[in-house]
Amino acid sequence: MKIFIKRHNLVAYLSTKLLATIFGTALLLTTIMEALVLLDQLNSILERHLGTIGVLHYMMLRLPMLFSSILPLSTLIGSLIALTQLTLNNEITTLRSAGLSTFDLFIKLLPVPLILSGLCFIFYDQITPKTELNLAVWWNKSDPNPQKGKEFYFYQNFDIISIGYLTYGGNKIVDLNIYKRKNFSHLESILTAKEANYCHRKWILSDAKILNLDHSSNLNFKKITINQPLIWQTNLTPKILVRLSSVNIPQSLHTISHQLFNRYPLRTPTNSLKTTIWQRFFLPLTFIIMIIISLPVTFIPPRAGLKSWLPIYCLSCGLFFIIFQEVLNALGKAGTLPPPMAVIPSILIFLLAASAIILTIEEKP
């Protein structure tokens, strides 16, 4: 029982040490990224007359995205700093003299990447999609020149829907075109509307025209909103349209799965959605690799101290892993690589390479 408590205390001490350093690093890097992003968008915020409250609102909504994106790099840098400090303070030497191998040390550090990957998954899947969507709605609502927005289109079941631009936070559509299809190759009709306004949970079309492509009809648009407005029967809401208007807004696995089964409107290519799913499920291994890449610093000779180049080598290796992983993920989202091949190889290569380097260093006298 005493041995179990001692081992538990060691795991808690090492995990607390690493987590404190990692979160400190994440806080510093997130602050720097927040300042850079704010400098880039400050003129746009002030042009919209949003003032100090608008600046603070923008910073708060952008914060989860920046924190979650910087967390893997923070894990690498924070682990290097923490393990280097433990090595220079002779704490790692003491543990090794007590019979703790490098593998045992890694096992005791394992709760750290698991906690961080779980936290990162929650941000990616639950927090960031909501904050980024709220930011996009707020940004669209305060846009003084919405007509400069880019036209976009998306799929809803068999239909193709094209929108000129959105305004008032997605509550108003300008230049709406609905291409009704019986199947993926048979176009049935084209419905156009100059405007569509969201009122009482319904879309009311203005200046709507329809072109029926049946063999018996003339190929001329027929106006259908002469005496009364036309209600567009759809389950689309302003927030859904704002999300579809930008391909950069992250989505939860629930939304992605429904899009892949044609239950939700779809704009993003399916390869991109599948690659995102694979990325989310392999998050724990990404953080584990960051810890493994940091382990060689525990072999710094006591006399070398901070003059050792091992932390620089480990940092370079970790940065190369992040870049290599992002390149493969981009190829997967573009459809050049199958989604599994865009995620698994980078993790497998660096996992085996880092483990081999640690074993080689450990075997040296």
Image (cartoon, grey):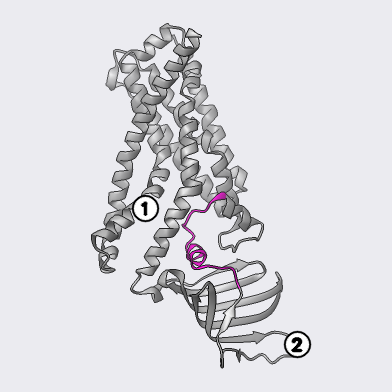
Q: Which residues are magenta?
A: 234-253
Residue displayed at 54% across by 82% down: 205
Q: Earlier in the sequence, mark 2 or mark 1?
A: 1
- Placement of 43 over or under 78, stated as above or below: below
Left or right position of 178 against 206: right
> Tag 1, which secondary structure?
helix
Residue for badge 2: 215
On whether residue 40 falls in the magenta region, the answer is no
Q: The residue under label 1 is which amino acid type?
A: Arg
Crowd rating for badge 2 (residues with CA inside 10 Å; few <14, some 14–19, many 20+): few
Residue 300 screen position, x and y as percent? 36, 17
Q: Nearer the viewer, residue 168 or 199?
A: 199
- Placement of 208 over or under 101, stated as above or below: below
Residue for badge 1: 62
- On the question of residue 309 being in view, the answer is yes
Quarter placement of the C terminus:
top left
Residue 235 screen position, x and y as percent? 59, 68
On whether residue 238 falls in the magenta region, the answer is yes
> Tag 2, which secondary structure?
loop
Q: The residue under label 2 is which amino acid type?
A: His
Q: Nearer the viewer, residue 78 or 327?
A: 78
Residue 132 screen position, x and y as percent? 43, 56
Left or right position of 165 against 221: left
Crowd rating for badge 1 (residues with CA inside 10 Å; few <14, some 14–19, many 20+): some
